[in-house]
Image (cartoon, helix red, strand yellow):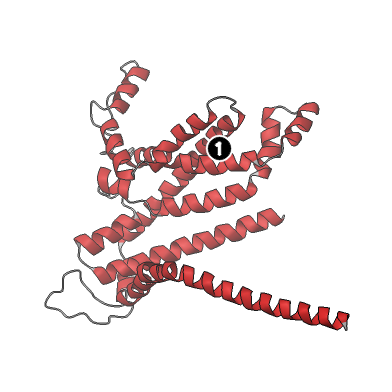
Amino acid sequence: MSKNRQLSVRSAGSKSDGLLTGHDRLQELMMIFPALMLLFLFLMLPFLMSIELSFTNQRLVQGPVATKFIGLRNYVRILSDHDFWQALWNVVRFSLMVIPLQCGFALVMANFLNKLCVMKGFLRSLFFLPFITPMVIVTVIWQTIYQYPNGIMNSILEAVSFGTLGPVEWLGSELWAMPAIVLLSAWQAYGFQMIIYLGGLQNIPNEIYEAADIDGANGWAQFRFITWPSLLNTNVLILIITTIQALKLFTQVNILTKGGPNGTTNTLVHYIYESGFVGQKIGYSAASSLLLFLLILGIFLVQRLSLSRLENN
């Protein structure tokens, strides 16, 4: 009898636990419901509306021509537009330059902070400061640095070359405008990658480095065979995030060059902005936005698949 009572009590307790778990799940769902609604209203709903608009001739300010369905005409016009392909090449060129520069510098600074014994917290905050500074402020500051002909960059160039190299119009030259934006962007955002790299470095056990010291491995050998392989997952995260951010380049271009000179710094987001808000072609701009979304999604999937295979191997 006592055993039966114990079993009945246990079964009743398990049922009450199940009811409690279900109640807790309902409470959790109710707590995240407002956030889900906000995500739907401000992310999913505009995305779905942009898909609809991309198949129309919708304008920012409605003119005498009524909005109508035009099928794939916007996409055909975009893919046959030379400015679109130039903007695509510019953003690919920017990504190829800024990703290794920004991530490499972030790794160097993270390694420096990881080995530092004094003032680590202060320097970490100092190095992270550019990232939390609004991009508009950073861009305006760098605009004065690049100022022609008496900006700080030209003064440094003149001092280093002992006056043999004349002032460079950094933002007005087709050759130097994109590298100037790359340098600005890498300096502003490297702090984010530095913090992630620092977390990855701190997760590597010190015993591995101590064993390598005993075996006579120098600093480069330790980095090549211990540090770099241990940061594989960190590199995957940083590469994906940095690539997505690079493809969305806009603020620096809009403030410094407006896409010039001769379209050499025009990017896809700036192309979308010009067609939607300057040209007032909302349907055309929506189609361009969807193509950018598909491009980012495709690159993300390719990177994730490739890096996952590399990790498995």
The secondary structure type at the circle numbered 1 is: helix
Above-or-below relation of 213 to 55: above
Residue at 58% in and 59% down: 304
The location of residue 164, given as percent across then percent down, is 32, 18
Residue at 52% in and 41% down: 195
The location of residue 210, given as percent across then percent down, is 76, 30
- Say which quarter of the image contains residue 287: bottom left
Q: Which residue is disc 1 drawn over? A: 107
Q: Residue 91 or 3: which is nearer the viewer? A: 3
Q: Does residue 75 appear left or right of residue 33 in this picture? A: left
Q: Residue 195 or 108: which is nearer the viewer? A: 195
Residue 106: tell me if it is visible. yes
Q: Does residue 296 appear left or right of residue 134 in this picture? A: right
The location of residue 298, given as percent across then percent down, is 50, 63
Quarter of the rendering occupied by the C terminus: bottom right
Residue at 20% in and 69% down: 60
- Say which quarter of the image contains residue 16: bottom right
Quarter of the rendering occupied by the N terminus: bottom right
- Residue neighbourhood size for the residue with mark 1, other residues' Cα within 10 Å, grouped as few (<14), some (14–19), many (≥20): many
Above-or-below relation of 210 to 245: above
Residue 260: tell me if it is visible. no
Amino acid residing under circle 1 = Leu
Q: Which residue is at the far left?
A: 64
Q: Residue 226 or 183: which is nearer the viewer? A: 226
